[in-house]
Image (tube, rainbow, N blue to C red):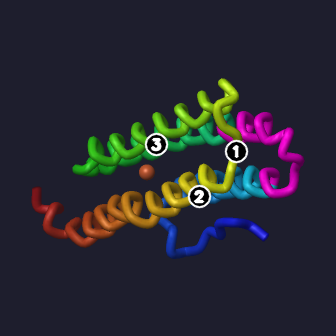
Amino acid sequence: MPKITWSELLSVGNEEIDNQHKRWIEIFNTSYDKMMCDDYSLLSNIGIDALKQMMEYAQMHFEFEEKYMQQINYPALVEHKFQHDLFKVQLHKINQNFENGISKLNSEIMKMIENWLIGHIQTEDQKYKFFTTNLGNKDDSKSGL
Ligand SMILES: [Fe+2]
């Protein structure tokens, strides 16, 4: 049973970004399943693999999303990018702890990632959806410019 399920409530109104969010949720769910099923002694390797995958995906996805926000002239791009950067630093620190043998993948770390992922898509990402929706409504007034 997947840990996170994508629903229309998470849609940001952009098909490509929605697909990327779905893929990211899939990566998270696969890592979660591995953590639950595999031997404790393998958790270091599972953790490093999972984090590496998540960091690579975050990098690609954030770049895409930031470019999109730039294209639509989203006014809160700097603040949004800051949230992305903070999360990248968090993932990097967790990964370092795994590589240095300080910690292993555990449910607390997965919960933190899950909360960030869902929280970010449901709040921060919805703000640019709201912006593009409002932009559509304002198109008439702009046509005279
Ligand atoms: Fe975002």
Looking at the image, residue 113 lies above or below residue 139: above
Residue under label 2: 111
Residue drawn at x 66%, y 37% as measured from the top left: 103
Q: Nearer the viewer, mark 2 or mark 3?
A: 2
Residue drawn at x 34%, y 59% as measured from the top left: 128
Residue under label 3: 87
The residue stretch that appears in magenta: 34-51
Q: Work out whether residue 63 or residue 101 is closer to the camera in this orientation and state it.
A: 101
Corner quadrant of residue 32: bottom right
Q: Is residue 133 left or right of residue 13?
A: left
Residue drawn at x 81%, y 51% as measured from the top left: 34
| Mark 3 secondary-structure assignment | helix
Q: Is mark 3 within 8 Å of ligand 1?
A: no
Q: Earlier in the sequence, mark 2 or mark 1?
A: 1
- Badge 1 vs badge 3, beta-carbon distance below 8 Å: no
Q: Work out whether residue 55 or residue 23 is closer to the camera in this orientation and state it.
A: 55
Corner quadrant of residue 138: bottom left
Q: Give the x, y percent position of residue 77.
A: 29, 45
Quarter of the image that includes the N terminus: bottom right
Q: Amino acid at mark 1?
A: Leu
Q: Main secondary structure of the magenta part?
A: helix
Which numbered marker is on residue 105? Answer: 1
Looking at the image, residue 42 lies above or below residue 97: below
How far apart are the two marked residues, 2 and 1, measured between alpha carbons? Answer: 11 Å
Q: Is residue 57 left or right of residue 68?
A: right
